[in-house]
């Protein structure tokens, strides 16, 4: 299939003063509709809001359910949720948060090694020596969670 392009350029139609007025009116109408929707929600009514521009048969929706958070009590300092070590994501989150604290003037909790050229190196050293008084919360989709002290992890 061959597509031919026209070299002629079409000029955009000029907007008149009445078009500007119409635009202002439609904006104020949208504001009124938004206010009415908020008032309807406050009254307890539900308004259907479309979350996607796709048709209903193209969108997968899942039933939403609420759950209560329930803590699992650890026996003998055992890790019951997830691996028995820090995951790379947990390690990265802790390193980043702690290096930010150090760069903003927090005192280091370990002796600063000579090879440490940045706050990130000091934060990594604190994690390796398990000097940070923090715990990790691992949550399952069912709502059960366990708070794990960094001392319990390998």
Image (spheres, helix red, strand yellow):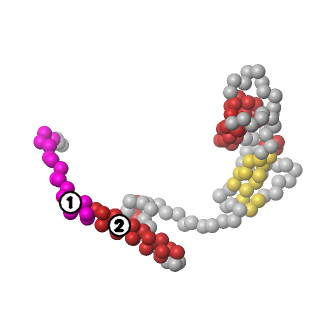
Q: Earlier in the sequence, mark 1 or mark 2?
A: 1
User: In terms of depth relative to the viewer, which is nearer, 113 or 66?
Assistant: 113
Q: Percent from the top left, x then y, of residue 13?
A: 16, 53
Q: Which residues are magenta?
A: 4-22
What residue lies at 15% left-to-right and 41% top-to-bottom? 5
Please tell me in which quadrant of the rendered image residue 102 appears: top right
Q: Are marks 1 and 2 in contact (CB under 8 Å)?
A: no
Residue 4 shows in the view: no
Tell me where residue 94 appears, x and y as whole percent: 70, 40
Which of the 4 image quadrants contains residue 57? bottom left
Q: Is residue 51 visible?
A: yes
Nearer to the camera, 93 or 30: 30
Q: How far separated are the C-alphas under marks 1 and 2?
A: 17 Å
Q: Residues within 10 Å of mark 1 (few under 14, many from 20)?
A: few
**Circle 1 sits on which residue?**
17
Question: Which residue lies under the disc numbered 2?
Answer: 28
For the point 30% across and 63% down, the residue is 24
34 shown above or below 118: below
Q: In the picture provided, is 120 more to the left or to the right than 132?
A: left
């Amino acid at each position: 299939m061959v597509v031919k392009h026209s070299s002629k350029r079409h000029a955009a139609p000029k907007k008149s003063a009445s078009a500007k007025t119409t635009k202002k009116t439609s904006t104020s109408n949208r504001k009124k509709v938004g206010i009415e929707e908020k008032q309807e929600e406050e009254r307890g009514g539900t308004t259907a809001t479309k979350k996607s521009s796709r048709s209903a048969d193209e969108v997968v929706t899942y039933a939403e359910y609420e759950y209560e958070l329930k803590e699992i009590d650890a026996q003998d300092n055992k890790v019951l949720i997830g691996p028995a070590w820090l995951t790379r994501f947990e390690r990265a989150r802790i390193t980043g948060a702690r290096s930010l604290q150090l760069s903003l003037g927090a005192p280091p909790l370990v002796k600063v090694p000579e090879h440490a050229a940045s706050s990130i190196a000091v934060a990594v050293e604190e994690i390796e020596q398990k000097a940070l008084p923090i715990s990790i919360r691992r949550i399952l989709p069912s709502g059960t969670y366990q708070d794990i002290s960094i001392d319990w992890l390998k």
